[in-house]
Amino acid sequence: MTSFAKYLLTPEQKKELVDKFGHADKVPASFSSELVKRNLGELNVVVGAVERMGESMRLLQTLIDFDGEQSEIFEIYGSGGRQKNVSKNKRGVSSAEVLELLMEDKEFWRKVAKPYFEYDQSISNFALQLHFKQVEGTY
Amino acid sequence: MNSRMKILSMLSVATLLVLWRQISIFFKQANVDGAFNTVAVTPPPVHPASYSGKEEGEGFTQYIDDSYHAAIEVGKIPLSWPPLPDFAKKITNTQPIMSCIGSDKVLDRLVFIHMFKTAGSTIRTLFREYSKKCDRGWVCVTDCSDLDPSSFIGKESIDAVWQPREDSKTWDNPPKCRIKDQVTRTDSRDVEFERPPENERIRNNADILGGHLSLGVNPWAQQDHINVRYLTFVRDTPIKFVSGLIYTTFQMDPATTTTVQQMSVKIKKRILKARDKVRENPKLVKCESRGSY
């Protein structure tokens, strides 16, 4: 199953898939990824993007603060670019640095890593498309 | 008079030549940027390591990189991506569902699906702060992504305690689905932390519910007049994957002195191992969902 399945399939769907394929690990990623995309669209999921916190915060504000009374909170967390860093990354190992190092081995990246990420990437791309459309819809 | 005419015609020719050159440059640029919906005024930045775009030497330039990363940088969805299917075309979910202050201003409930390594701490803190200022109920749960459907289906589920799916108990001490945080409305009571969530308590105490849970989780399912709206955050796959493994490594051994190089080797090994597994059995998954990731 794709890694998104854990969060973006419903409890009923997961149960059905496990019943059908015998174990969660045996569900083909191609199958579960299409189901995840369908859920995102049909269940009208609002999608934010970590890389677009400003737009995501504006989207969220239209949902839960339509009078605009608490604009400051949404600005702090993204809209105004003064993103408040609440994560506790004191590990000294940056994800970007590790990723950059992995990508330096171009052969590995093209032939092994990219195919490995294929289905998850297709879901991320699909969700990002929804995000763009939803942000457009709020203006 | 004649010399003035000559100068004027020379100037006109020069102006035309300059204009022609500008037009040629514009169309050349438009052709390169044509991979995106509209012509970008300035070309997108070139990524140091081509990310998942086409590489130079394959007959393409990085300007037509159509990766997630490039879409973020350019602010547009590449034309090469398949269009959204009909089931995803209707935008009905950006309608407001609540506002700050005034109980009559809560129309629906919000359920935040926190996927691992996708801005969860930021969003949880925001909901906490918003709820305190606006007198809204916020309930945060954790380890609730694998629940039994009976927790929400059927009339008996109205006061059900959330139950894990039986086959999800794949290891000795699976993490228990529990309540982790709450902001109480003035008219509601405290829920008990570290206890399994119950539909009735969630309904009575939450306007916003969030945490590591899945789509379909809906304590209001048996109340016809209340709808839930789901919210989630997405992040580019490779960086999410790497971030998740770094997090897990340091969670399991906080004293570890793993370096960037060691982490890169570890991740490479993990991906190769998964690739070999898929080769042995092509029906198996890619990018498997075991562990926290």
Image (cartoon, rainbow, N blue to C red):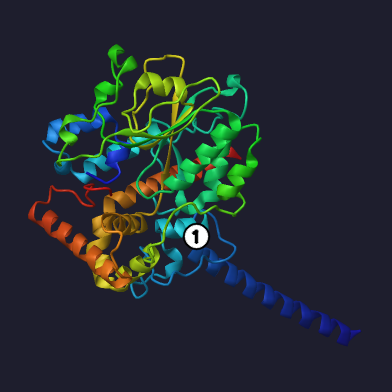
- Classify the position of the C terminus of chain A by image quarter: top right
Write the residue at 32% across / 33% down. Answer: B178
Q: Splitting the image into 4 quarters, where does residue A8 fall?
A: top left
Front-most of B251 and B280? Answer: B251
Give x and y (percent) for residue B200: 38, 18
| Element under disc 1 | helix
Front-most of B252 and A105? Answer: B252
Q: Tag 1: residue type?
A: Glu
Write the residue at 37% across / 15% down. Answer: B222
What residue is disc 1 on?
B73
Give x and y (percent) for residue A51: 47, 54
Front-most of B80 and B141? Answer: B141
Q: Is residue B82 visible?
A: no
- Determine whether, in the image, residue A62 is placed left or right of residue A12: right
Write the residue at 59% across / 54% down. Answer: A81
- Determine whether, in the image, residue B86 is placed left or right of residue A70: left
Q: Splitting the image into 4 quarters, where does residue A32 fall?
A: top left
- The residue furthest left is B280
- Determine whether, in the image, residue A95 is placed left or right of residue B36: left
- Classify the position of the N terminus of chain A by image quarter: top left
Front-most of B92 and B80? Answer: B92
Local packing at callout 1 (Cα closer than 10 Å; few below 14, some 14-19, many 20+) is some
